[in-house]
Amino acid sequence: MPVSEPTTERRWRTFADVVAFALGTNVWISIVILPAIYVGGLHGMRILSSMLPFAVLMLGLARRSEGILLGLFPAAVLLPVSLQPQLASQHVYGEVRFGLVAAGVIAYLFGVSFFTTFHEPPAPRSVRQLSSAQQGTASRWQRRERVYWGLTALSIIFPAALIAWVDYDGAIADFLGKMYPGRVALMTTALTAGAIGLWLGVFHYAFLGVLRPHRTGDRDLVSALTKARAEAKSGKPRARFYAAVATALAAMAALVLMRHLS
Amino acid sequence: MRRYFFEVLAVALIGGSLFFFKETLDYLARRDYVAALLVMVIGVAVISVGKEMARLALVQRD
């Protein structure tokens, strides 16, 4: 059916665009526009900085670029907040409102990352059952899926907990009030940006770092285990066993000697 | 039988090494840095011995 393929594709694209527009506009309004109206910061040149995230969102939709929608747009949302730190202050965000905004941001990120990459596959010309398909999903891929779900949960819990801790812990607010009188909103916003940066670093190095070798079938780990098993076949401890025993005895002797001399 | 012996020994050594690391923290709290370093070296050595015992237990299992 060569005619139905482009139609289905177009329908999905339109659906993805509508989802990204609705959720992105929600993020823009809830993080930039409503707080700006609340603190009276929507006038003059600040209107331009407030409109910038919306322009970036439109650009991302026009180009259908995941880089712009998932990277540049969230960064553009932070620009008006960095120019007016009071937009992200505790007085603007109550705990309930923070929860709602966080849910909106999560919905946007997941909606865009899911729907922009989802494509309806074209109808197959013929269907043939493969023997491997009847064995079900391999346990390795089931493990990997569990890791993905774990990372998804961590991606929600970690940054939300870090930001909530920075913004709503009374001890931190008191400390900032004492150390930086008159600049609490600015310092809180800086700490929030630091929390986001910390999470991105941890996610990139600690979580994705583990997944990368797994993608290639744990080749390094499997070869290391095979080597260790072959070495262990001798049934005798390796030289490092005797070295460790000697080191422990030497350190204990040094400790006793040190105590005796002092 | 030897397998269980090696396994128990490995668990005891690796678990016992935690005692040395706890002692390291105590020495650090008392600002006795040299003693803390020595006890930490003992802890690392004990955990290495435990690791070797675990390898031997693995061979016995095969």
Image: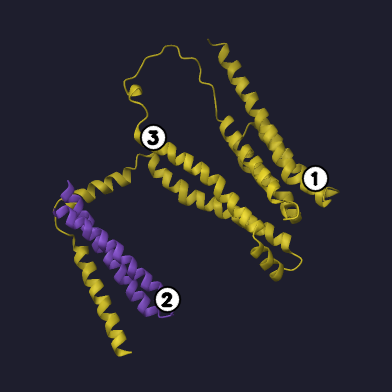
Chain colours: A yellow, B purple
Nearer to us in this view, A208 or B58: B58
> Identity of the amino acid at label 2?
Leu
Asked whether residue A116 is in view, the answer is no
Nearer to us in this view, A72 or A31: A31
The reply to whether discs 1 and 3 touch (Cβ–Cβ < 8 Å) is no
Residue at the extreme right of the image, as rendered: A44
Q: List the residue tagged with mark 3.
A: A141
Asked which secondary structure carries label 3, the reply is helix
* Discs 1 and 3 carry the same chain letter: yes
Task: Point out residue A119 in the picture as x, y percentages from the top left corner.
Answer: 54, 24
Task: Point out residue A133 in the picture as x, y percentages from the top left corner.
Answer: 35, 23
The chain holding disc 3 is A
Q: Nearer the viewer, mark 2 or mark 3?
A: 2
> Identity of the amino acid at label 3?
Trp
Q: In the picture shown, does residue B54 fall above or below A59?
A: below
Please tell me which of labels 1 and 3 falls first in the chain: 1
Give the Cα separation between the discs numbered 1 and 3. Answer: 48 Å
Q: List the residue tagged with mark 1.
A: A48
The reply to whether discs 2 and 1 touch (Cβ–Cβ < 8 Å) is no
Q: In the picture shown, does residue A249 fall above or below A56?
A: below
Which quadrant of the view contains residue A16? top right
Nearer to us in this view, A79 or B24: B24
Nearer to us in this view, A156 or A202: A156
Q: List the residue tagged with mark 2.
A: B28
* Mark 3 Cα shell of 10 Å, populated few (<14), some (14-19), many (≥20): few
Asked which secondary structure carries label 1, the reply is helix
Asked which secondary structure carries label 2, the reply is helix
> Identity of the amino acid at label 1?
Leu
Residue found at x 55% / y 48%? A157
Q: Nearer the viewer, mark 2 or mark 1?
A: 2
The reply to whether discs 2 and 3 touch (Cβ–Cβ < 8 Å) is no
Give the Cα separation between the discs numbered 2 and 1. Answer: 55 Å
